[in-house]
Image: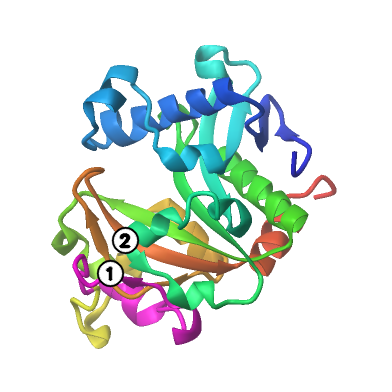
């Protein structure tokens, strides 16, 4: 285990310890991505009511567990974590299905891909998100990870409905070229939909999902282009975050001595 469980009241964040807990996290993902958000699913996924793919076997699964809850083994939040080393077993990161990440692969240092983040609707509050970030902070410290990346989503597969927020991200938070991800040409959707001088920044921020705002607070930056995921009914953007921001802002701010 990369770090010891971190607890606040009945909630603890830790890594999945066995296949049963991974299965429970997949069931939570199915509940959120397919049932709540309306994502499509294969017959096999629908029959088992769990969201799964080949990447699950090579990833670590970060969990928030409510020790007072018995339903679904108490798992109320999850993140899927994939480091550069384990990635070699499958040949590429999940993000490479949507984005050209060659700039990142040239980066010296350990990489961490974040994905499949979701929280039970009854637990979408500051406490659970704080625990998830504390867990990520502990994880990146344990493995010496320097840079993390992944995708974050707007609900709905029509990017025009998110034109203000996407344009704001493009103009004010675009990643520098040396680490910038870019949507693959066959899927590329420009985020430059509204000129910079016409953007109401406060209005744009109100439209940005909480997870993306969390990345921005860590000085996260955004890749070039959006990706429309018709399977999961989302519009995705790519995120890159230097991990010193995570360890400094979250591990210290929300650490045991705070």
Q: Residue at x 26, y 43 (%)?
A: 232
Query: Is 22 placed left or right of 31 in the picture?
Result: right
Name the secondary structure under disc 1. loop
- Disc nearer the start of the sequence (1/2): 2
125 or 154, which lies in front? 154
Question: Residue 227, can we see it?
Answer: yes
Residues in magenta, as a range: 166-190
Residue 202 in the image: state x and y as whole percent.
Answer: 35, 69
Residue 154 in the image: state x and y as whole percent.
Answer: 29, 53
Q: Is residue 225 magenta?
A: no
Name the secondary structure under disc 2. loop
Residue tagged by mark 2? 98
In the rendered view, would you say 231 is above or below 251? above
The quadrant in which residue 201 appears is bottom left
Mark on residue 123?
A: none
Q: Residues within 10 Å of mark 1 (few under 14, many from 20)?
A: some
Q: Residue furthest right?
A: 257
Q: Is residue 183 magenta?
A: yes
Residue tagged by mark 1? 184
What's the CA distance linking mark 1 and mark 2? 6 Å
Callout 1–callout 2 Cβ contact below 8 Å: yes
88 or 5, which lies in front? 88
Query: Is 164 placed left or right of 93 in the picture?
Result: left
């Amino acid at each position: 285990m990369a770090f010891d469980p971190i607890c606040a009241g009945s909630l603890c964040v830790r890594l999945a310890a066995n296949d049963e807990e991974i299965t429970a996290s997949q069931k939570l993902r199915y509940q959120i991505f397919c049932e709540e958000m309306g994502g499509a699913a294969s017959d096999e996924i629908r029959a088992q009511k769990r969201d799964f793919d080949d990447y699950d076997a090579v990833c670590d699964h970060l969990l928030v567990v409510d020790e007072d809850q018995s339903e679904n083994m108490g798992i109320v939040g999850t993140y899927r974590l994939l480091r550069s080393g384990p990635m070699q077993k499958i040949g590429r990161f999940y993000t490479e299905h949507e984005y050209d990440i060659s700039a990142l692969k040239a980066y010296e240092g350990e990489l961490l891909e974040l994905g499949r983040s979701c929280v039970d609707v009854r637990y979408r509050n500051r406490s659970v998100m704080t625990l998830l970030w504390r867990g990520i902070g502990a994880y990146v410290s344990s493995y010496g990870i320097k840079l993390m990346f992944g995708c974050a989503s707007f609900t709905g597969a029509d990017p025009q409905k998110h034109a203000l927020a996407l344009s704001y991200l493009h103009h004010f938070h675009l990643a520098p070229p040396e680490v910038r991800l870019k949507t693959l040409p066959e899927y590329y959707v420009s985020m430059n939909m509204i000129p910079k001088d016409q953007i109401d920044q406060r209005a744009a921020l109100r439209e940005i999902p909480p997870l993306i705002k969390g990345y921005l607070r860590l000085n996260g930056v955004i890749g070039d282009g959006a990706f429309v995921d018709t399977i999961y009914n989302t519009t995705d953007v790519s995120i890159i975050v230097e991990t010193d921001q995570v360890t400094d802002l979250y591990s210290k701010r929300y650490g045991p001595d705070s």
